[in-house]
Image (spheres, grey):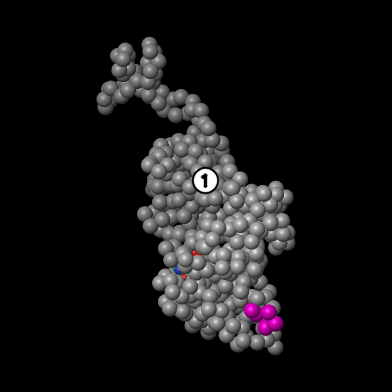
Amino acid sequence: MFRMLHVGLDDTDSERGMCTTYLGAVLMQRLGGVAEVAEARLVRLNPNIKYKTRGNAAVALRLITSRPEVVKSITLRTVEELADMRSPSTAPGVVFWQGEVPESFREFYRRCLHGVVGIGEAEEVLHRHGGEYVKFKLGRGIVGALAAIGAELRERTYEYIAYRSPERWGTPRRVCTESVRRMNRLTYPLTFNNLDEEGRVLITPHTPCPVLFGIRGVSEQVVREAAGMVVALEPVVLHAVYVSNQATDAHLREVGRIAEVEPLSSVVLLGRVASEPRVIEGGHVFFRLRDEHGDEITCAAFEPTKGFRRVVRALLPGDLVRVYGGVNERMQVNLEKIEVIELITRREVNPRCGRCGRRMKSAGRGQGYRCRRCGTRAERRVSEPVERTIEERVYQVPPGAMRHLARPLVLGEPAIPESFL
Ligand code: ATP
């Protein structure tokens, strides 16, 4: 009898190499004749956790098979063979589940997107439902493996991934840049994040992993066609198309007030700019955001966000904004997007000297203002129009600095925002 079997995999890679999506692709190849792949899922989880190697990805396969025991043994053998077991931080986990996905798996996925979850919590959910799992070493991978099975993917994108032959892993990737630019011209925005703002290729990673290139887009057909336009200058030995929660903003959660923000979550917050943006060494920009309850939090735009920092630097105290970003341990919001809702148009400044035109300085507390040069005096500050260099709209970090889960603005808003579902 044919049954639906879910196989979740995670934590098979290390900084030195491997990639869970590659392991998934090899597994799909090896399962030919034993199972039909109904869906291959690439699920990104909380981007702020410390355990991740790179992009906190997990993989789950939805299989239709009459031989679940054979599938399980092929899966475990493949993990044993390919996972980078020698790396101390690699702790693979595999989860098997037959039948309908229970609501508590879905809830577990949501917790893995927004918070930090323990291995014991995954085991508790699996024991409660009689789910099967195998831990290698510490087995932290069962967290991502279970979450990938539980992922809702109501909103979804696709990624076509081409893999290199093993003897080339760790060497420079060889893909024709002009073919990538052409592919982008013909398919953007149905495919996205192919190039950065300067036209540099983003589809090839810079890690020693097996991926040659990955193309992200809105449908399976689009990413397949786009991949066909890319000229690889080295052999592609394997490929896979994954359905994914990438580019859906699934990690972001609207938080009513700053006092409720939790470290290592990803939030959407409404407030007014409460301090002049400050640029520190290295080019990072910071400002304070204050909500209607008077609580404040620091927001940051780091150097890799490049031109986005110009927008942040141009903010002024009093501007009404909605910020989107990941919260670090020090409770700082690392900005992914900012919606400028209302720009102030006037502000209080020290008056100018009627004689020389220079700005007066404070003459001391309660003493009004005084021109240092001419000695002219004035009692109070004056309201002046300010020229603004930014507009009331949403700004986002450039593709090269974008989180995997961040929805590029070019995709527009979903018909029904995920947070309402
Ligand atoms: P790559 O992107 O190259 O696949 P990675 O960044 O996905 O690498 P992993 O090696 O998969 O990194 O490590 C992430 C680990 O963190 C996994 O063991 C996963 O189970 C676990 N994990 C994922 N999400 C959470 C979470 N929210 N809380 C706790 N652990 C998590």
Query: Label 1 crowding class (10 Å Cα cut-off): few <14, some 14-19, many 20+?
Result: many
Which residue is rendered at x = 53% and y = 38% of the image? 342
The residue nearer to you, when weighing 326 against 39, is: 39
Task: Give the residues drawn in magenta, as a range.
Answer: 30-35
Point out residue 144 in the picture as x, y percentages from the top left corner: 51, 71
Residue 32 lies in magenta, yes or no? yes
> Is 218 drawn above or below residue 320 in the view shown?
below
> Is 100 drawn above or below residue 214 in the view shown?
below
Point out residue 133 in the picture as x, y percentages from the top left corner: 51, 81
Main SS of residues in magenta: loop
The residue nearer to you, when weighing 173 against 364, is: 173
Q: Secondary structure at mark 1?
A: strand
**Res. 390 visible in picture:** yes
Point out residue 289 in the picture as x, y percentages from the top left corner: 42, 44
The residue nearer to you, when weighing 242 against 234, is: 234
Point out residue 315 in the picture as x, y percentages from the top left corner: 47, 37
The residue nearer to you, when weighing 233 against 285, is: 233
- Is 250 displayed left or right of 139 in the figure? right
Dot 1 corresponds to which residue? 338
> Is 151 drawn above or below residue 132 in the view shown?
above
What's the amino acid at mark 1? Ile
- Is 83 displayed left or right of 283 in the figure? right
- Is 40 displayed left or right of 170 in the figure? right
